[in-house]
Each structure stands twice: as structure tokens, then as C-alpha cells.
């Protein structure tokens, strides 16, 4: 395939080099009318017969040719009976078993002949001395068009007799042409024609014949002055300098409106004038004025409306009576009553001023200033009247005068109310009020206000005729609660009202109440919340839903009535944390509140009280038991806690003195005892004289002491001297226990036992040689462990004296 394509390309390049067109598509025209027949052929004489075939494609779609076999090389004519495309690419290919090779291609466009232009008109601008001509095109030919405007001289019968004097070809699709003053005569006849042309054909508009000066569009008219007087305004205006010569041929229109209105309400037409008086206007009102003009024969076009001129009319006295209503704010049966008066604004055609003052008097005398109760520009007034005063008078006034007075009678409001009222919403900002009419009622008064604005609320009210039974209230704010009252009006009194609260549209509350935890136990939690204020509820609260969630994610809830503000959550687990929140719902939606954490206790208050009571009971029983024990065992308890301490003054130790004065006689045999307890005390007796020091005092035996004792106790001629006893307390132990064997058993080792006392027995410093004249102690190595006891001093130590050993 690539080889064959290469051969064809080389062949075509060879033909081009020779300057010979190798192949081409022959067609009558590349632009044809849509739906017309189309014939084409692809001629390529250099291709040899039988080697290649011709293939046609239209927008990449293969189109078969009319001949089943080639009459000659490169011949394959193509014919369309109806070409319905707006545009198409026609291509011719050479084909064999190796592929296709493009020989030639051409783009074919199809459309329609142009339609004649319409609405041809020309207007002369006097100030600029130009002629502006415009037209409209259908643009349905589907082909590119060329537009040409031509002007001709003509006669009164609109017959041209010369060739075109001026041609204009707009660009960029414009549909107008501006003809300069040098190409036309302002007062002569002129013919204008527009031609549209494309490659299929052309079309020309009808011939327009005109006199340029008669086809004029004036400049906007400017009001020069606006002078108010009474209920009229005098207007003066001027034309442009170049248009002033046409003032006798002008027709003008005036329109006006109140400055606060959007739509122009007045239209006055005048001819050949430059001054106009417009009357019948409201006094003290701001008005806007505009003027436009045209040629009197209505040729040409109206000028644009001129700039707006505003003026305020003069004020005049208000007309008509005020429509009033009242309500009692406070009442004292003995003194005064406080009343709020309400009245409607006067209609604009009766007020005759933008701003009015309203005066309330207790008397109808106009010049009595002492009777003025209120003087204000508002539409309500609060006054205080004696309880016996039942009428007041009200009127409106301005700088020009006052309106007729309106009498207000404060009648009782104890009449029969209407039997039934119904208020429904008919949109986001409307309410439909219906009631059952009363036969004797002369009319009805409807009163409505926002419920949350009491007591200083803005009241809206309206009176209805006796035959009325319904009313649609407008300008109601959604998500706001309104109170609607219906009063029947009788001849001598006012009926009692029937009241209904309603929303035009409800929504979810702004927030849900904040939870206040009052009490929590191991199985219950008491919560409380405040109701949502009316101004934040956005609807009637239908219910509250309390949710509590434990740590495992288990959710429980309880739905409560709208009037509920307290709830006791039961069946809780002890020592568990719960998440608690409240959902507030209206018919318009719901909102969740803030979540709080609640932790239940381990024990309830009852459990704690029971345990405390049990402890108190057991304590009380224990006290009683102790009292009983103390009564029964009082002596033992007394000795236990308050032991008897001997009184030294009453001690029997003094009775031992006579016994100690006698010499005890002790005879014993050490061998007779199995066990002897002795104090390891070395007792030295001596006389009141200087003796040589004793050696080995600590090793003196009982026998030595006995011998010495017997000598002293033997009869002698010498007068016995006072004995002295020396006690050696060098040892640390107070007692030594010598234990003999039981029966024939060997005795155990001696056991030393310390005394409970921490003070050595009779331990003191060594006696002073100066006091006792005993120098023997100075030679003793045991000076510090031996002290001298005088016999006469032994009386002060009866226990020690009892330890003296006396043998016969």
C-alpha cells in the first residue's frame, strides 16, 4: 500500500512540475440555492485506464457516482437531485486495492436569495444637519449579504429620473446610514432605497420618498420654569435654537406624577404653545414633569422625553375626618384612666400636605388652648382622662388650616363577641381572617400585632363594613407570632374581642434551651430548662425531646409536651457518664441544644442515709454495752484505768522501824536450799576509825564476813563502836539467780535478769574522806564503786537495813 501511494505521489509531483493540472473537480458554482440540483465531475487524464477508480466523499461520507464502470480513465460523474446542506466539503479520491489518494476538493455553500429590507425610514437632525436612515433585515438567506443604500432625485409622484447620487455601504452588520447635508436638499424631494445582495441574487426595498425638513426628530424639550400656585403649576419650556423656527408647527405632550410614584399618571397634549397650566394637583405634594414634541402634521417622530423637573405644590387645609380607634392601658375606678388613641393617616387627596400635625382636645372649642391633650405628628397618642370624661376631639392641621374635628366616644366594651373566628396562613406574608357576622353589629374592627412586643407594641388595625365576614392581612412577617383580635361594633357599645395567635410561616427555633442539672443519683437525674422566648421560637413549640447517651453509644429519648420545663431521667446505670441534650420542635423544623455531661453516683442518698443510720445504731448499741460492762465490772474497770497509788504518808514501812532496830538472827545452811536468790552485794562493816585498805574486797566470802561479825558481837570490855557498812555496787546486774537442779537433774546455767528500773540501787558517788575520815578508801582500787553507810543513816533505808546479815 505504501508503495502504491508513493507511486501516485511521484506521478502527481511530476505533473505539477510540468505545469499541467493533473486532476480537478468541475462544478457549475460553489454557491447554490439550497434544495437545487448539483452536478460534479473529477477529471484526471494522466491516470491510465483501468488502474484506478474515482471515489467521492461529502463531509467524509462516501457518495456513489452515477456510472457503474469507468468509460475512460478518471471519469465518474456525480449528481445530486437536491442539495439540502447549508455547507459541505466535496472531495475526489483515486482508489485501488492499495488505498485512497486525494485528488481535489471544493467547499460548497447553499442558501437562499436575500429578502428585501423593510421599515426604511429617514429622520433629519436639524441641529446636526444630517439625515439618518434606518431599516430592518430578515437575515434568512444563510449567506453573506452586502447592503447598499442609494439616494435619488425624484418628483412629487416619487418617480426617479436620474442615477443614484449617493451610495452608502454599512459595515459590521449595521442597519443605518448617515447622509451628510451636502447630498440632499432639506426642502426638496428625495428618494431612498436599500438593496441586499448575495451570490445567489439580490433584493431591493420599496422606494422611500420624503422631504427631509418634514421628517424631523426634535431634540428633547427642556422645561424652563415650574411655578406652583394653589392646586396648579405653570410650566414654561423652550426649543433649540435651530428648531425655534418650527414652533408654530409643534404639538407637545406633558406627563406628570407624584414624586413617590413609579408610574406616570397624567398626559396632556397641547398645540402651538410654550406655556401650560396644570391644575387639580394635591396641595403640599412634590410632582415630577416631562415634555416631548413632534411636528404638527405628525410626520417624523416624537422627540425623547426631556429631563425631569420637580416642584412642590402649595399646601391647603386638610379635608375629611380622621378614622380613629382607642384602647385602655390603665384604669382607676376613683381617679383617672390612661388611654392610647390611634388614628389612620389621611388619604393623600385629603391631606393636602406631606406632613400633618394632629391635635387632641377635651373640648370642641378651637381657640381654647387649655383643653389640648396632645399635639403630635405621630399616629398615636397616650392621654390621661378623669373617669367621668367619655369624649375627646381630634383634627389634623397644616400651615393652611385644620380639618374638621372628629369626635371620639369612649364607650364600654362589654357587647356580645362574634361567635367564632378562624385565622389561617395563605402565604409567607399573608393571613386570612374569618368570623361569623353578628346581626346587630354595624361593623367590625380587626386588630393585629406582634405578640412578643407587648405591652409597647405597634398595633395595626382596620375597620370593616357590617356585611364583611373575612379579611386578608398583608405585610405579615414570617416566623413572627401575631395576635389577631376581632371586635364587633354596635350602636351603643363595642363588643368583646375574640383573640387568635398565629404564624404566617413557621420555622425551626433559633436555639434549644440550656439544660440545668438539679439532682443526680445512681439511677436518676433531674433536669430543668427555661422555655424559649416567643421572639426566638419562630413557631409554636410542639414538643421537647430529651436524649441521653451512655458511654457505649446507646441512645434513649423521651418526648415531652411543649409546656414541660422539667424532667426526671430514670433507669440510669450507677457510676456512668451520660451525654444529655434537648431537641426543640415546631411544625417548621427542629433544633438540638447544647450537650451536657452527667455522671451518676455509686450510691443514692437513701443508701448513704441508711449506712449512716446503721453506723449510728451500732455506735449507740456499743455505747450502751460499754455502760453495762462498766456498771457490772466497775471495780475492775476502775483499777484498770485508775489504779490505786499507795500514799507514802499511810505506808506501813514506818512500822518496820522497831523491827529493823533489833538485830535479826538468821541461821541457815546454804546446803539446805536448792535455790538461793541473793543480791550480788559486798557488804563491808567497819568501825569509825582509819583502817588499812582491804584487798580483794569483791572476793570476800560470807565466811569471812561471818567471822568478822562474830568477833564484833563477842563480849568485850571495850565499848562497841558504831558499825559502818560499805556497799560495793560495781557490778551492773542487780540480781543473780542461782538455780539448783530439779531432783537429780543437773542445774542450768545461771541466768541474769535485769531489773525494770533504770536507776542503780543506792548508787552514789564515793563518800568523801573529809566527812567520814576514812582514808582507807583512797588506797582502794574500788574507790568509785564503794561508799560508806553509817549505821545511824541506815534508818533512812529500811530495805537496805533488812539486808544486813547478823549471825549469832
Image (cartoon, rainbow, N blue to C red):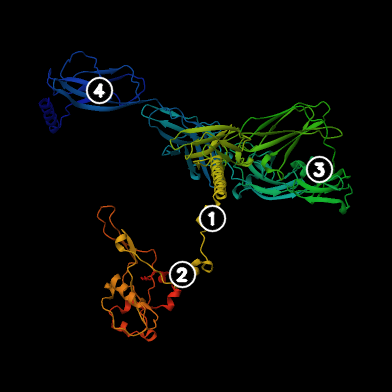
Q: Is mark 1 on a helix, strand or loop?
A: helix
The nearer-to-camera label among 2 and 1 is: 2
Please tell me which residue lies in front, 124 or 173: 173
Contact check, label 3 and label 2, Cβ < 8 Å: no
Looking at the image, residue 452 sits to the left or right of residue 8; the answer is right
Distance between the Cα atoms at labels 1 and 4? Answer: 139 Å
Please tell me which residue lies in front, 451 or 37: 451
Distance between the Cα atoms at labels 3 and 4? Answer: 89 Å
The nearer-to-camera label among 1 and 4 is: 1
Mark closest to the chain's N terminus, 2 or 1: 1
Residue 630, how many percent across, how many down? 55, 50
Q: What element carries label 4?
A: strand
Q: What element carries label 2?
A: helix
What residue is shown with label 2?
659
Q: In this view, does 652 lie above or below 743?
A: below
Looking at the image, residue 138 sits to the left or right of residue 698; the answer is right
The nearer-to-camera label among 3 and 2 is: 2
Distance between the Cα atoms at labels 1 and 3? Answer: 117 Å
Where residue 596 is drawn, which disc sits there?
Answer: none
Mark closest to the chain's N terminus, 3 or 2: 3
Where residue 638 is drawn, which disc sits there?
Answer: 1
Where residue 57 is drawn, which disc sits there?
Answer: 4
Mark closest to the chain's N terminus, 4 or 2: 4
| Residue 770: quadrant of the picture | bottom left
Looking at the image, residue 758 sits to the left or right of residue 533; the answer is left
Distance between the Cα atoms at labels 2 and 1? Answer: 35 Å
| Residue 140: quadrant of the picture | top left
Mark 3: few, some, or many residues within 10 Å (few <14, many ≥20)?
some
What residue is shown with label 3?
319
Residue 384, how many percent across, how many down? 82, 48
Mark 2: few, some, or many residues within 10 Å (few <14, many ≥20)?
few
Amino acid at each position: 500500500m505504501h508503495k502504491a501511494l508513493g507511486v501516485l505521489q511521484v506521478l502527481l509531483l511530476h505533473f505539477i512540475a510540468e505545469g499541467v493540472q493533473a486532476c480537478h473537480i468541475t462544478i457549475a458554482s460553489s454557491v447554490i440555492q439550497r434544495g437545487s440540483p448539483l452536478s460534479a465531475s473529477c477529471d484526471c487524464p494522466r491516470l491510465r485506464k483501468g488502474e484506478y477508480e474515482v471515489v467521492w466523499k461529502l463531509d467524509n461520507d462516501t457518495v456513489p457516482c452515477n456510472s457503474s464502470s469507468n468509460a475512460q480513465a478518471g471519469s465518474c460523474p456525480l449528481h445530486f437531485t437536491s442539495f439540502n446542506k447549508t455547507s459541505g466539503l466535496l472531495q475526489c479520491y483515486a482508489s485501488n486495492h492499495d488505498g485512497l489518494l486525494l485528488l481535489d476538493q471544493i467547499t460548497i455553500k447553499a442558501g437562499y436569495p436575500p429578502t428585501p429590507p423593510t421599515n426604511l425610514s429617514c429622520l433629519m437632525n436639524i441641529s446636526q444637519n444630517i439625515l439618518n436612515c434606518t431599516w430592518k433585515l430578515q437575515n434568512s438567506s444563510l449567506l453573506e449579504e452586502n447592503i447598499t443604500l442609494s439616494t435619488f432625485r425624484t418628483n412629487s409622484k416619487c418617480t426617479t429620473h436620474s442615477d443614484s447620487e449617493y451610495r452608502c455601504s454599512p459595515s459590521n452588520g449595521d442597519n443605518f446610514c448617515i447622509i451628510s447635508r451636502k447630498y440632499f436638499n432639506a426642502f426638496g424631494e428625495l428618494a431612498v432605497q436599500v438593496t441586499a445582495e448575495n451570490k445567489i441574487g439580490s433584493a431591493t426595498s420599496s422606494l422611500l420618498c420624503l422631504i427631509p425638513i418634514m421628517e424631523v426628530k426634535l431634540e428633547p424639550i427642556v422645561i424652563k420654569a415650574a411655578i406652583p400656585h394653589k392646586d396648579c403649576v405653570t410650566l414654561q419650556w423652550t426649543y433649540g435654537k435651530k428648531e425655534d423656527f418650527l414652533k408654530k408647527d409643534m404639538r407637545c405632550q406633558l406627563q406628570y406624577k407624584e414624586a413617590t410614584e413609579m408610574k406616570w399618571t397624567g398626559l396632556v397634549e397641547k398645540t402651538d404653545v410654550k406655556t401650560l397650566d396644570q391644575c387639580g394637583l394635591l396641595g403640599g405634594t412634590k410632582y415630577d414633569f416631562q415634555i416631548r414634541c413632534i411636528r404638527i402634521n405628525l410626520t417624523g417622530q416624537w422627540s425623547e422625553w426631556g429631563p425631569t423637573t420637580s416642584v412642590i405644590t402649595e399646601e391647603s387645609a386638610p379635608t375629611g375626618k380622621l378614622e380613629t380607634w382607642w384602647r385602655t392601658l390603665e384604669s382607676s375606678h376613683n381617679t383617672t384612666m390612661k388611654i392610647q388613641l390611634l388614628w389612620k393617616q389621611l388619604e393623600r387627596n385629603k391631606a393636602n400636605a406631606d406632613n400633618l400635625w394632629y391635635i387632641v382636645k377635651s373640648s370642641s372649642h378651637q381657640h381654647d388652648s387649655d383643653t389640648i391633650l396632645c399635639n403630635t405628628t405621630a399616629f398615636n397618642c397616650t392621654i390621661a382622662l378623669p373617669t367621668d370624661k367619655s369624649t375627646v376631639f381630634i383634627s389634623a392641621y397644616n400651615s393652611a388650616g385644620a380639618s374638621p374635628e372628629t369626635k371620639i366616644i369612649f364607650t364600654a366594651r362589654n357587647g356580645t363577641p362574634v361567635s367564632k373566628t378562624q385565622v389561617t396562613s395563605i402565604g409567607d406574608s399573608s393571613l386570612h381572617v374569618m368570623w361569623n357576622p353578628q346581626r346587630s353589629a354595624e361593623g367590625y374592627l380587626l386588630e393585629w400585632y406582634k405578640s412578643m412586643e407587648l405591652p409597647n407594641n405597634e398595633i395595626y388595625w382596620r375597620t370593616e363594613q357590617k356585611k364583611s365576614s373575612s379579611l386578608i392581612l398583608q405585610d405579615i412577617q414570617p416566623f413572627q407570632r401575631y395576635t389577631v383580635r376581632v371586635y364587633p361594633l354596635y350602636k351603643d357599645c363595642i363588643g368583646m374581642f375574640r383573640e387568635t395567635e398565629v404564624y404566617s410561616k413557621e420555622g425551626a427555633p433559633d436555639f434549644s434551651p440550656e439544660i440545668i442539672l438539679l439532682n443526680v443519683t445512681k439511677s436518676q437525674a433531674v433536669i430543668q430548662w427555661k422555655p424559649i422566648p416567643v421572639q426566638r421560637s419562630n413557631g409554636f413549640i410542639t414538643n421537647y425531646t430529651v436524649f441521653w447517651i451512655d458511654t457505649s453509644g446507646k441512645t434513649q429519648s423521651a418526648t415531652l409536651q411543649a409546656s414541660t420545663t422539667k424532667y426526671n431521667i430514670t433507669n440510669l446505670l450507677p457510676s456512668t457518664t451520660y451525654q444529655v441534650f434537648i431537641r426543640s420542635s415546631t411544625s417548621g423544623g427542629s433544633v438540638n441544644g447544647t450537650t451536657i455531661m452527667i455522671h451518676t453516683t455509686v450510691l443514692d442518698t437513701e443508701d448513704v442515709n441508711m449506712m449512716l443510720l446503721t453506723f449510728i445504731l451500732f455506735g449507740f448499741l456499743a455505747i450502751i454495752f460499754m455502760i453495762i460492762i462498766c456498771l457490772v465490772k466497775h471495780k475492775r474497770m476502775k483499777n484498770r484505768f485508775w489504779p490505786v497509788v499507795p500514799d507514802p504518808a499511810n505506808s506501813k514501812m514506818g512500822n518496820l522501824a522497831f523491827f529493823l532496830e533489833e538485830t535479826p538472827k538468821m541461821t541457815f545452811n546454804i546446803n539446805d536450799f536448792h535455790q538461793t536468790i541473793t543480791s550480788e552485794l559486798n557488804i563491808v562493816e567497819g568501825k569509825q576509825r582509819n583502817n588499812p585498805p582491804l584487798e580483794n574486797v569483791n572476793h570476800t566470802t560470807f565466811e569471812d564476813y561471818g567471822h568478822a561479825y562474830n568477833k564484833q558481837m563477842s563480849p568485850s570490855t571495850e565499848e562497841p563502836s558504831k558499825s559502818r557498812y560499805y556497799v560495793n555496787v560495781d557490778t551492773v546486774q542487780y540480781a543473780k539467780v542461782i538455780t539448783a537442779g530439779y531432783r537429780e537433774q543437773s542445774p542450768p546455767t545461771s541466768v541474769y535478769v535485769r531489773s525494770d528500773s533504770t536507776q542503780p540501787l543506792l548508787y552514789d558517788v564515793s563518800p568523801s574522806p573529809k566527812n567520814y575520815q576514812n582514808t582507807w578508801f583512797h588506797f582502794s582500787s574500788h574507790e568509785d564503786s564503794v561508799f560508806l553507810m553509817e549505821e545511824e543513816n541506815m534508818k533512812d533505808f529500811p530495805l537496805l537495813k533488812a539486808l544486813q546479815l547478823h549471825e549469832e
